[in-house]
Image (cartoon, grey):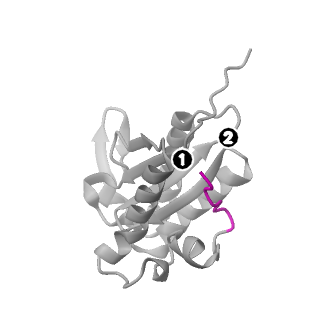
């Protein structure tokens, strides 16, 4: 019998680019993340409640659906985005910047051991959502969270989902 993995609580996930390099500075690379999230939602693997994509890291609040373990989803997300990054970096002649030549890989884009925290209460969820939405403001990129495009802040502030996959958390 198949084991049920669905998480009862949303997860706060943070992934950082290797050595804090600014791989995600260009929109082309941010869109790789957006497309990966769209795919996971379309395939009913996750619900995405919030996110922000910064130049060298990202934060996602998501919840697994059905029999999908959040760990497998994260691993799949990291693996898939790495493959697409590699292809895009080859096209942009920037792949050498990410060469590591370790035993298990030639290139590395994401730091290992991404952060994952279960959000047990509505208060903790709101705190983490506010934290991720304020990232671009703290970085001096914009004055208000909803002014930053690659974020779910506009969805929570004005109900506008530019990405078509954000689901409001009602917890």
Residue beneath the point at 38% across and 70% down: 134
Give SS at disc 1: helix
Residue indicated by mark 1: 77
Q: Nearer the viewer, residue 74 or 66?
A: 66
Is 166 colored magenta in this rendering?
Answer: yes
Q: Main secondary structure of the magenta part?
A: loop
Q: Nearer the viewer, mark 1 or mark 2?
A: 2
Left or right? Give the position of 59 relative to 4.
Answer: left
Label 2: few (<14), some (14–19) or many (≥20) C-alpha neighbours in 10 Å: some
Residue 104 at least partly seen = yes
Q: Earlier in the sequence, mark 1 or mark 2?
A: 2
Name the quarter where the N terminus is drawn.
top right
* Magenta highlight range: 164-171
Left or right? Give the position of 123 relative to 76.
Answer: left
User: Where 65 sits versus 5, above or below?
Assistant: below
Point out residue 61 in the picture as x, y percentages from the top left corner: 51, 53
Q: CA distance from mark 1 to mark 2?
A: 15 Å
Examine the image and state in which quarter residue 92 appears: bottom left
Q: Nearer the viewer, residue 87 or 116?
A: 116
Give SS at disc 2: loop
Point out residue 140 in the picture as x, y percentages from the top left corner: 29, 80
Residue indicated by mark 2: 65
Mark 1 and 2 residues: CB-CB less than 8 Å, in contact? no
Is 12 colored magenta in this rendering?
Answer: no
Q: Nearer the viewer, residue 137 or 2?
A: 137
């Amino acid at each position: 019998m198949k084991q049920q993995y669905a998480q009862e609580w949303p997860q706060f996930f943070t992934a950082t680019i290797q050595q804090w390099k600014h791989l995600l500075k260009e929109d082309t690379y941010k869109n790789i993340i957006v497309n990966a999230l769209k795919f996971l939602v379309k395939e009913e693997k996750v619900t995405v409640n919030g996110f922000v994509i910064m130049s060298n890291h990202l934060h996602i609040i998501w919840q697994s659906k059905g029999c999908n373990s959040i760990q497998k989803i994260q691993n799949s997300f990291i693996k898939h985005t790495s493959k697409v990054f590699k292809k895009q970096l080859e096209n942009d002649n920037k792949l050498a910047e990410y060469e590591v030549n370790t035993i298990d890989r030639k290139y590395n884009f994401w730091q290992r051991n991404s952060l994952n925290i279960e959000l047990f209460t509505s208060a903790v969820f709101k705190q983490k959502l506010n934290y991720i939405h304020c990232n671009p403001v703290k970085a001096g990129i914009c004055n208000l969270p909803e002014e930053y495009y690659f974020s779910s802040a506009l969805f929570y502030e004005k109900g506008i989902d530019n990405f078509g996959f954000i689901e409001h958390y009602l917890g």
